[in-house]
Image (tube, rainbow, N blue to C red):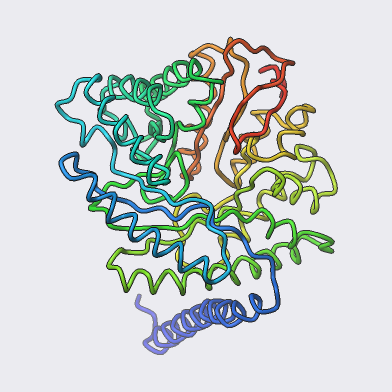
Amino acid sequence: MRPPINIIIQYFRYSLALLLFTLAGNCGILGAQQKSAPTAAVAGAEKPKIRAITAFINLDRAQYQQQVADALTLLKRARTTMESRGYQVQTIRIATQPFPEYTKGLTTQQAVAFFKEYDALAQKEKFAASIGPAMLNEGDNTAQAEMLAEILSNTKSLNASVVVAGDEGVNWKAVGAAARVMKKLEETEHSQGNFRFAAIAMVQPLTPFFPAAYHTGFGHQFAIALESANVVAAAFKDAPDLATARQRLTDSLAASAFDIERHVGRVDQETGWTYMGIDLSPAPSGDVSIGAAIENLTTQPVGMSGTLTAAATITAAVKDVKVKQTGYTGLMLPILEDKRLAQRWSEGHISIDALLSYSAVCGTGLDTIPLPGDITAEQLSLIIGDMASLAYKWHKPLSARLLPVLGRGWGEMTEFDDPFLVNAKLQSLDIK
């Protein structure tokens, strides 16, 4: 029996009204953020640094030097624009499609020779370079990962990755290959080669953060990555409750994000390079600590009760900012890039299992984790596999940047010699 026509009409009227109400609410949030952004900036709200302006190119070996020159023109234009607006730009970067696409037909020796030239160009022109994943798809040959290990072992600044999980599930062949790359890079000077390599899972193209950055299209695009742990710390300081902390953080990030988007939008129009968005993940750096920011909220050491709630609060606040977003769009907890996190790791407050639990509500997974040098490839595979399984289960971007230290055992201190790395005590893998 059909319902009376008047009931059908009332139903559609109600549905339309509900839809309009929802749209009006969303537009209201967006409009309020856009309206408040310049005001907050003028009022002296905490400004983040710009960690990276990343250009994506479809590299062709026959003309890569001209392609790099064109990308640098864009990047320097964007950097000058943002610096003139009071933003400090830490790095400019160039990322490519997966490198096996433009090294077809080369032997490992020939590929290494080419990338030595590319590495020298990157150092000369002062840009960071990512050459994309060695393995992207399920059927890719593990020999490509073996080639990558040789490339990174013989260069000083190139970044790359192996994709260990995608829409089809966890690629266990790639998991094992990534672990073997890490063991090979453990043999580099100060075991620092792994700082430029990650196993990545469910990470979409066009993230501006390294070493995960890559693309799969035509290139000629760019994106922004922030370094905004200071913004989180300011928003959380003396916050009376979680709701206030979250709203403060959203408002503060929106103030800068809309300002940045407005200016890079003009760079887009003037250069012809397509702006793909901003990754608002609040990356830390040394004393500018996301760990300290979390402790502002929980009043407990990172790793104690409340840390997961803080992680979820930060991620929710980031996602609430109504700008064009790309990349991880969550919380980063890079142990060796943050002095407070390195301290809490050394004290035993933070473990791999704890970081994986936080990753269920944020990102980016296991980042710059120091490990004893006697860890086996099989043990590394288990850690990478846990990260990949979590990423696939929740369909969220995660990565594992693990740094085993040659000749060092648990209880000993690392001796990294990199301005972006903090040293920490190696912990036993048995710590939960």
In the rendered structure, the answer to whether residue 31 lies left or right of residue 40 reads left
In the rendered structure, the answer to whether residue 57 lies left or right of residue 285 reads left
Q: Position of residue 421 (x, y in %)?
A: 62, 34
Vertically, is 413 above or below 407? below
Quadrant the N terminus occupies = bottom left
Q: Position of residue 396 (x, y in %)?
A: 48, 45
Q: Which residue shows up at 42% across the image and 17% down it?
A: 180
Q: Nearer the viewer, residue 185 or 246?
A: 185
Quadrant the C terminus occupies = top right
Q: Position of residue 382 (x, y in %)?
A: 52, 20
Vertically, is 59 above or below 140? below
Q: Position of residue 162 (x, y in %)?
A: 38, 31
Q: Which residue shows up at 66% across the image and 18% down it?
A: 429
Q: Which residue shows up at 67% across the image and 12% down it?
A: 409
Say which quarter of the image contains residue 220: bottom left
Q: Which residue shows up at 48% across the image and 19% down it?
A: 188
Q: Nearer the viewer, residue 151 or 302?
A: 151
